[in-house]
């Protein structure tokens, strides 16, 4: 391995950084989702020529930089859509996220800077076999999942789910609870779930840990990944799980399946909304009644009032300090009786 490769964050479950491997081009018939591939950065850099490393640190890359990512798919409503199966024979593709999710962009928002262009150099190989994400998934025993869960869903991407999750985790930790943080669906990116750790989560996990570069996969494959994540969460012995479903439940990331699998373990649902009318849309389309509405829809008193008028739901701007009392009250009302008392030494 004479060439020096950087390792994007989708490789963080692997041993590639310290293990031996070769890079060999494979025919398209042998390509598959979650394959590890090596690419070379091409084209003139834009603001999106940034790579998220295994640690979560972002670095700027230039033409000629070599790195390892994974083939996958992205279907973001506000930014970009892409698919590894759309890559032509010339091997030209894009970094669909800075985490190393690789595929050919097929639809990009005009407001977005130019995606990072890359050229396929080959698959990551060892002993003549290609290396894939699922080969590096750590084994876990089966457990009955019974962790009380606070579920974060959104009306779209960039609706404030991760920010809300951080605030909720911080509040739970302030009350002495052991908290797990998870991102169950979305497109590979480490920074979201790392921010849960920064907020105080005792354990974090996401779908990359389950061998998925994104959750735009078949329902069957997602269900296997979801089972793995829940088994891992059970092993943390957390008092509460704060779980984010990336994008919105109706987008092709299997968010609806994630909500269904969690089922009655969901004690509190937080809907992060881009605007008040989007709350109505998600309510009607997905048949959910959240315990809290937050996000940009609650940025002003007028937004809060409109959400409550349209839906009858409780709207709270969680980023305001004065809202923490309301948040604490809602968490106490929705989480299992005695959980806070036990953590605070009550009867």
Image (tube, grey):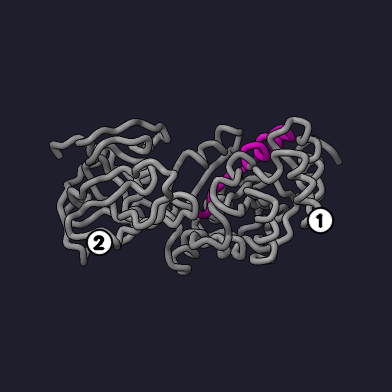
- The disc placed on residue 31 is 2
Which x, y percent locates residue 77? 49, 55
Over which residues does the magenta segment extend?
Answer: 165-185
Crowding at mark 1 (Cα within 10 Å: few <14, some 14-19, many 20+): few
Which x, y percent locates residue 302? 76, 42
Q: Which of 294 and 6 is in front in this view?
A: 294
Q: Which of 287 and 245 is in front in this view?
A: 287
* 199 relative to 325 in the view: left or right: left
Identity of the residue drawn at 44% across and 54% down: 210
Q: Does the magenta stretch include residue 100?
A: no
Which x, y percent locates residue 199? 60, 33
* 90 relative to 209 in the view: left or right: left
| Quadrant of residue 181 within the rendered picture | top right
- The disc placed on residue 312 is 1
> How far apart are labels 1 and 2 at the CA level?
50 Å
Q: Earlier along the polypeptide chain: callout 1 or callout 2?
A: 2
Q: Does residue 197 appear in the picture of this structure?
A: yes
């Amino acid at each position: 391995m004479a060439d020096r490769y950087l390792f994007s964050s989708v490789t963080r479950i692997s041993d590639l950084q310290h293990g031996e491997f070769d890079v060999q081009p494979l025919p398209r018939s042998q390509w598959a989702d979650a394959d590890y591939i090596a690419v070379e950065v091409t084209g003139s850099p834009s603001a999106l020529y940034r790579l998220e490393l295994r640690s979560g640190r972002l670095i700027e890359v230039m033409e000629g930089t070599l790195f390892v990512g994974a083939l996958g798919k992205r279907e973001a409503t506000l930014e970009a859509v892409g698919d590894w199966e759309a890559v032509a024979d010339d091997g030209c593709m894009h970094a669909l996220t800075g985490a190393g999710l690789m595929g050919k962009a097929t639809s990009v928002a005009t407001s977005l800077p130019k995606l990072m262009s890359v050229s396929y150099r080959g698959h990551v190989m060892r002993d003549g076999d290609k290396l894939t994400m699922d080969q590096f998934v750590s084994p876990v025993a089966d457990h009955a999942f019974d962790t009380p869960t606070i579920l974060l869903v959104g009306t779209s991407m960039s609706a404030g789910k991760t920010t809300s999750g951080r605030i909720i985790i911080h509040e739970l930790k302030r009350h002495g609870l052991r908290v797990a943080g998870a991102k169950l669906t979305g497109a590979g990116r480490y920074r979201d779930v790392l921010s849960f750790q920064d907020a105080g989560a005792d354990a974090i996990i996401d779908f990359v840990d389950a061998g998925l570069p994104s959750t735009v996969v078949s329902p069957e494959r997602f269900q296997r990944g979801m089972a793995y994540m829940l088994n891992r969460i059970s092993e943390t012995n957390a008092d509460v799980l704060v779980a984010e479903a990336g994008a919105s439940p109706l987008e092709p990331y299997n968010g609806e399946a994630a909500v269904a699998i969690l089922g009655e373990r969901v004690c509190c649902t937080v809907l992060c909304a881009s605007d008040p009318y989007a709350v109505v849309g998600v309510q009607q389309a997905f048949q959910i009644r959240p315990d809290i509405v937050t996000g940009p829809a609650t940025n002003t008193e007028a937004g809060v009032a409109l959400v409550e008028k349209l839906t009858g739901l409780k709207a709270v701007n969680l980023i305001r300090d004065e809202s923490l009392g309301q948040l604490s009250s809602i968490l106490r009302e929705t989480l299992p009786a005695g959980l806070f008392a036990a953590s605070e030494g009550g009867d």
